[in-house]
């Protein structure tokens, strides 16, 4: 079932207009597709992008599977992504990940049974000077502690999901100023 | 007498509202662009040449050489591309710059675009950097509204457009040719390089003249135009080839981790002091001078000029890199830190070249085996052998960057590896020993 509406297609056309070739709009187009398909990219989503951009479906699949932020399976509503790289590691990231795992009763890489939360180990977030850092949706939480996690889990339950609506899909149109 | 730390990029860093156009303009913002747009592009390149500016992204390649390789006309579209795909572990400066000083980046891009005769600029921002992206995009929008972007800007007859482009999570896209692949909608894999292919300045993205510059490099251009290249080149207290200031992200075991603008050539011990020194009650065990790919350095000597040339040869690190300075004290398990980095590079290897793809896969397995108590003494030779098979044998610098922390940690902390192999744990970091 195709999910791209006329509005989706208009958004994709605006993205294509930013580049000399339609193919160059592939990365931003996949962000839009990820939003339309509820936070991940099933094969139909890649096919729709391929059809609209006029790019072979194999190219789209190749790109979608190359980049880690395009999800190839459904994701939790709130993804707690904790940086595990060295600056965070020497400042207690592993302990923080362990705390999250115990609190939610899942292992890193898994989501809770109701699909609300997941805990994920991610690579350097570029927040090395305020380690350890974690990210939920578009927001960074720096110098994170167990209290940060407690508060976050409490608050997120009532907040809209940014994994289902990736902010990356909101690329403004050129000339829209 | 400590070196006087001239602030150029961060001069107005803490002015409230400096991320807004009106505040930025009130502090002299866009004045250098007004000047640049009336200048001969060659004169701008000459100022940059005289300034001695070198790329701030990691490689330290002289900026003017890249710019000078552009065709000296506007017969075809030229592209100016900003590398804001900051991902080198230990590096956080571009994020801060884009969050706090987005107009400085936009003005830097505009000045650079005049120099390379480009009407279009793409700022390639990593997918995780939503806040910096919004900050930069807002600055771009406001610059359009103020007439610094758009058609016939400031009556110059020139058009300028800046677009943001978000990545989607791939360390490799910070490599300039992989970034160009990604910008064109491909997998982020490196492309053929000279001499096997033309320079990107001749045939880059969409086979048009293109250049990729780091965020900080572009943001430095207004300061160079304001001071003049010669005055800029007077800043710097070390090597004659390392001029000006550079942003350093200082992280790890220091009292005041943060991002600091530091005059190149400042003694390393002073740099450490600027970040408050090693955290109280602890001692320096090792450090990584410029992002994880540079490798580990020994805790002595410390009194050397911290710039592109100053890092002592005997540290065997690759150098200043991106300015991601990571400090580790005696509690650090260097084997474990290296293991983490090996897994990082293994995850981020794009898979194009067999030595990097397979070599890192094996390294990752060997480190995991040693960490879980199944290490063998011959593993040390095996690690060396794999490093040797990767070194200089892959297409881009990722493989090289991956093995440098491995080789330097083996040279300096072989006893920690042996401790894991013989005792299944790191007796040195457990006991808080600095090691050999």
Image: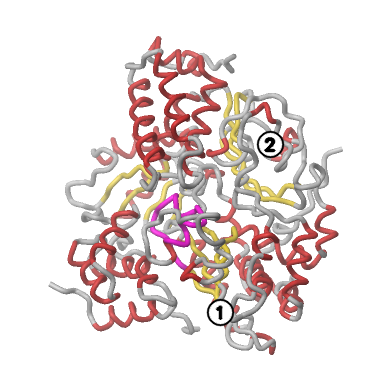
Q: Which of the two discs, 2 and 1, sits closer to the camera?
A: 1
Q: Chain of mark 2?
A: B
Query: Which quadrant: the N terminus of chain B?
Result: top right
Q: Quadrant of residue B28?
A: bottom right
Q: Secondary structure at mark 1?
A: loop
- Residue drawn at x 41%, y 21% is B382
Residue B32 image position (x, y, % from top left): 74, 73
Image position of A53 with respect to B58: above or below: below
Start-end of magenta stretch: B165-181
- Kindly identify which residue carries mark 1: B76
- Residue drawn at x 62%, y 37% is B289
Q: Chain of mark 1?
A: B
Using a 10 Å C-alpha cutoff, classify the residue at mark 2 as few (fewer than 14 neighbours), some (14 to 19) or many (20 or more).
Answer: some
Sequence-wise first label, 2 or 1:
1
Instruction: Same chain for labels 2 and 1? Say yes or no.
Output: yes
Residue B412 image position (x, y, % from top left): 57, 21
Image position of B160 with respect to B67: above or below: below
Q: Is residue B175 magenta-colored?
A: yes
Q: Is residue A164 magenta-colored?
A: no
- Kindly identify which residue carries mark 2: B276
Q: Is residue B128 left or right of residue B152?
A: left
């Amino acid at each position: 079932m195709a999910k791209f509406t006329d509005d989706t297609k208009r958004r994709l056309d605006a993205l294509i207009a930013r580049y000399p070739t339609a193919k160059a709009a592939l990365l931003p187009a996949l962000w839009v597709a990820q939003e339309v398909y509820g936070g991940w990219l099933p094969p139909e989503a890649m096919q729709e992008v391929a059809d609209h951009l006029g790019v072979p479906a194999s190219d789209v699949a190749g790109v979608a599977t190359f980049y880690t932020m395009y999800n190839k399976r459904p994701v939790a509503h709130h993804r707690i992504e904790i940086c595990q790289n060295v600056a965070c590691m020497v400042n207690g990231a592993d302990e923080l990940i362990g705390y999250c795992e115990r609190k939610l009763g899942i292992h890193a890489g898994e989501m809770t049974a109701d699909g609300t939360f997941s805990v994920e180990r991610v690579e350097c977030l570029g927040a090395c000077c305020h380690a350890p850092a974690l990210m939920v949706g578009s927001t960074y939480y720096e110098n994170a502690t167990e209290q940060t996690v407690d508060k976050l889990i409490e608050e997120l339950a009532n907040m809209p999901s940014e994994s289902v609506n990736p902010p990356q899909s909101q690329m403004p149109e050129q000339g829209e100023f | 007498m400590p070196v006087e730390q001239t602030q150029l990029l961060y001069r107005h860093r803490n002015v409230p509202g400096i991320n807004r156009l009106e505040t930025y303009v009130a502090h002299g913002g866009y004045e250098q662009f007004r000047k640049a747009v009336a200048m001969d592009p060659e004169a701008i390149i000459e100022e940059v040449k005289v300034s001695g500016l070198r790329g701030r992204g990691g490689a330290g390649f002289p900026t003017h050489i890249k710019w000078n390789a552009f065709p000296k006309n506007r017969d075809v579209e030229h592209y100016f591309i900003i590398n804001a795909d900051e991902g080198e572990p230990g590096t956080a400066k571009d994020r801060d710059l884009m969050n706090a000083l987005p107009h400085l980046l936009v003005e830097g891009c505009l000045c650079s675009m005049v120099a390379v005769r480009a009407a279009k600029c793409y700022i390639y921002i990593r997918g995780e950097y939503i806040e910096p992206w919004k900050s930069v995009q807002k600055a771009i929008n406001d610059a359009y509204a103020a007439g610094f972007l758009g058609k016939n800007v400031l009556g110059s007859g020139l058009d300028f457009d800046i677009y943001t482009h978000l990545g989607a999570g791939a360390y490799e896209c910070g490599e300039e040719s992989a970034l160009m692949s990604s910008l064109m909608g491909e997998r982020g894999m490196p492309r053929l390089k000279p001499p096997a292919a033309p320079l990107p300045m001749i045939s880059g993205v969409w086979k048009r003249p293109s250049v990729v510059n780091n965020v900080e490099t572009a943001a430095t251009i207004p300061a160079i135009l304001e001071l003049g290249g010669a005055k800029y080149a007077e800043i710097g207290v070390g090597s004659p080839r390392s001029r000006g200031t550079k942003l350093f992200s200082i992280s790890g075991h220091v009292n005041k981790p943060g991002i600091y603008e530091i005059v190149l050539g400042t003694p390393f011990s002073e740099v450490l002091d600027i970040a408050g020194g090693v955290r109280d009650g602890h001692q320096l065990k090792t450090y990584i001078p410029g992002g994880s790919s540079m490798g580990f350095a020994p805790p002595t000597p410390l009194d050397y000029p911290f710039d592109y040339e100053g890092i002592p040869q005997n540290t065997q690190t690759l150098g200043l890199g991106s300015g991601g300075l990571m400090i580790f004290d005696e509690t650090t398990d260097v084997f474990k830190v290296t293991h983490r980095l090996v897994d990082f590079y293994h995850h981020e290897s794009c898979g194009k070249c067999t030595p990097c793809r397979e070599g890192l896969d094996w390294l990752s397995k060997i480190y995991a085996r040693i960490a879980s108590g199944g290490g063998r003494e011959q593993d040390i030779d095996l690690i060396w052998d794999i490093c040797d098979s990767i070194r200089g044998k892959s297409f881009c610098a990722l493989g090289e960057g991956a093995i440098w922390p491995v080789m330097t940690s083996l040279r300096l902390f072989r006893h920690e590896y042996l401790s894991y192999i013989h005792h299944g744990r790191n007796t040195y970091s457990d006991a808080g020993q600095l090691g050999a």
